């Protein structure tokens, strides 16, 4: 499986890739989505396409559209929160 086309510019991956050893959950998601067969289902990717690029998606949104454990959605714009609801 090839890596996601957003792999080198995805803020989520840049931020959390280095913390893989700290979170099995994040590691599992990155393997399934960014490196794996579920990348077509990535909510981040779908929202990035709508908003014009991966940089417009909140960094703490996981590929399944949920906030990383220990963080929240309060900083996400209403537009982003609405889009998440349509793609989850
Ligand atoms: S989180 Fe989504 S958009 Fe980012 S690299 Fe992984 S599959 Fe691609």
Image (cartoon, rainbow, N blue to C red):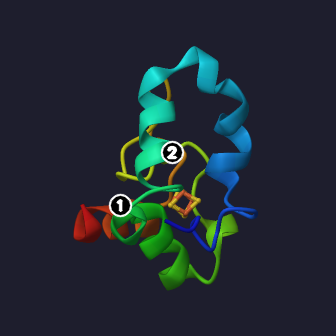
Q: Quadrant of ligand 1?
A: bottom right
Residue 40's place in the image compared with 15, above or below, is below
4 horizontally vs 26: left or right: right
- Residue 84 screen position, x and y as percent: 33, 62
How many tags in the picture? Answer: 2
| Residue at 44% from the left image edge and 55% from the top image edge | 33
Q: Please tell me which of labels 2 and 1 falls first in the chain.
A: 2
* Label 1 CB-ligand 1 distance < 8 A: yes
Q: Quadrant of residue 11?
A: bottom right
40 horizontally vs 18: left or right: left
48 horizontally vs 82: left or right: right
| Residue at 50% from the left image edge and 52% from the top image edge | 76
What is the secondary structure assignment of the residue under circle 1?
A: loop
What is the secondary structure assignment of the residue under circle 2?
A: helix
Q: Nearer the viewer, residue 77 or 66?
A: 66
Q: Which residue is mark 1?
A: 38
- Residue 50 screen position, x and y as percent: 48, 83
In the picture, the disc for residue 30 is: 2
Q: Nearer the viewer, residue 16 or 57?
A: 16
- Residue 75 screen position, x and y as percent: 54, 45
* Contact (Cβ within 8 Å) of mark 2 with mark 1: no
In the picture, the disc for residue 53 is: none
* Label 2 CB-ligand 1 distance < 8 A: yes
């Amino acid at each position: 499986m090839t890596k996601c086309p957003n792999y080198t510019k995805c803020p989520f991956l840049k931020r959390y890739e280095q913390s893989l050893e700290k979170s099995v959950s994040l590691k599992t998601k990155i393997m399934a989505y960014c490196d794996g067969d579920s990348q077509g289902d990535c909510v981040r990717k779908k929202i990035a396409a709508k908003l014009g690029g991966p940089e417009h998606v909140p960094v703490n949104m996981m590929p399944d559209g949920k906030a990383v454990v220990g963080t929240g959605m309060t900083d996400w714009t209403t537009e982003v929160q609405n889009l998440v609801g349509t793609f989850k």
